[in-house]
Amino acid sequence: MLLRCTGMCNYGVMVTESARGAKDETRKRILDVAREVLGQNPDAGMGDIAAAAGVVRRTVYGHFPARADLVRTLAEQAAEEIVVVLAEVNADDVPADVVWTRFVTRLWPLAHRYRVLLALRRGEHGDEIHTLLETVDRILADLTRRGQEAQLFGRHLPADLLGRMAYSAVFAIADDRRAGVAVDAEAATITSLLVLGVPPSRAHELAHLSGSR
Amino acid sequence: MLLRCTGMCNYGVMVTESARGAKDETRKRILDVAREVLGQNPDAGMGDIAAAAGVVRRTVYGHFPARADLVRTLAEQAAEEIVVVLAEVNADDVPADVVWTRFVTRLWPLAHRYRVLLALRRGEHGDEIHTLLETVDRILADLTRRGQEAQLFGRHLPADLLGRMAYSAVFAIADDRRAGVAVDAEAATITSLLVLGVPPSRAHELAHLSGSR
DNA sequence: ACTCCATTGCACACGAGCGTGCAATGGAGT
DNA sequence: ACTCCATTGCACGCTCGTGTGCAATGGAGT
């Protein structure tokens, strides 16, 4: 009952390396699979995840004491990755619409990894996840506001909501099963720019430049 | 075990009117409350719904033999209402962008009623609801295609996906708790038009005309 | 007063998912 | 060979939501 260790414990002790390596590998696989499974069905149980990962339910509990821990880890990873991308792309001396274009372009290939965030936003853990995405939302709101003040983005919606709409549009596109044709990064970029109120011609121009980079 | 009667049975027999009237009233209240409750939390149980409706759990089962029947009824109602609005608004001799504007304007005041559809689309009943919305999606896809062919809408996305994006944008706006300011129909209309690739100036013009009708 | 009947307030059985405990297995490192 | 230790397999107990059964209540219509 002393120091509950959720996840990474005795590092620095570093046992034989490959023994621990095996365990980490399993843990990683569980996380990868869980991201996929929960992305398609947020209500999937530990049993489903375990089966999909090729292990027994009991094993999952060996890595994550509770289902909530697994979900939280997943959400934290996703939010963290997005923040990193955002930090790399966001520069004050670059026009907001260009920043946004680069952001979406960078985000797109990873978008399927974050379906879990969208799927989880509603349902059970709404509040916890909302907290995790607060940082993302704030950065996005600032960027959007900057774009509005530079007359690059529209003012049809308040900045915070507008930012949320624009990037949830990206996820919505990536999310859409039953796409007749495969949708590419350029289409997603254009759509999100349109949401922001960027004129179609400019949106195409931006997306095309970024796409052929 | 003979003829299972889910919902409206012995009509035409019409018992004393107010006795049945009382029951229908309760049923209606349950549906109204369930729409609200399930809209906020798709995983809400029969107990939650009953409590919110001010009745006992057992009573709900008196009106809907199973939880699935309740949600199906809700989904059917919502889909039906949307189809009706669409039918009233959609005319071949009216430009697609005008039709769309009228559609969103008519839909907006009722949008909160249909959050349940969005909330239910993922989770448990995805397939059933998908079927119900097939009609809506088809009409929307046709309309969108018509707009694209008339050069009114963009071609950045295939027509079916574009249509879905545009009207899910409306629901997304209506859905957004934590809106600093109340968002009005005009803002929602503009946003969905932008998604469709309508130039901002034209989008504002359309939304404004429809708003001051 | 008498009769319907919608609602109530318990009772129960059932299934599903969670989280835990513990002995057994088996592979990789020494 | 011997030792770790991650994984397994099966055992529980627990909670929670579902759906059903049945007698009791009480109000509204006659």
Image: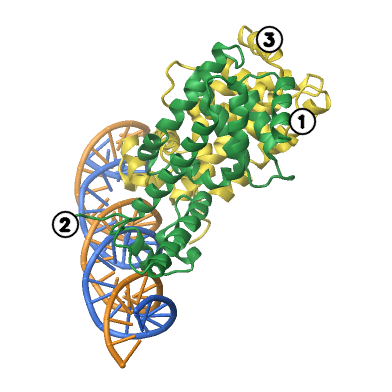
Chain colours: A green, B yellow, C blue, D orange
Q: Earlier in the sequence, mark 3 or mark 1?
A: 1
Residue A182 numbered mark, or none: none
Q: What is the quadrant of the C terminus of chain B in the image? A: top right
Q: Position of residue A162 (x, y in %)?
A: 53, 22
The answer to whether the residue labelled 2 contacts the one labelled 1, judged by CB atoms less than 8 Å apart, is no
Query: Label 1, on which residue?
Result: B155
Query: Label 3, on which residue?
Result: B205
- In-front residue for pair C11/A141: A141
Q: Helix or strand or loop: what does disc 2 sit on? A: loop
Q: Helix or strand or loop: what does disc 1 sit on? A: loop
Q: Is residue B10 visible?
A: no
Q: Chain of mark 1?
A: B
- In-front residue for pair A184/A205: A205
Q: Helix or strand or loop: what does disc 3 sit on? A: helix
Three-letter residue code for mark 1: Arg
Q: Identify the residue at horizontal 37%, vertical 35% (top origin).
A: A131
Three-letter residue code for mark 2: Leu
Q: Quadrant of residue A213?
A: top right
Query: Label 2, on which residue?
Result: A2
Q: Is residue B213 above or below residue A107?
A: above
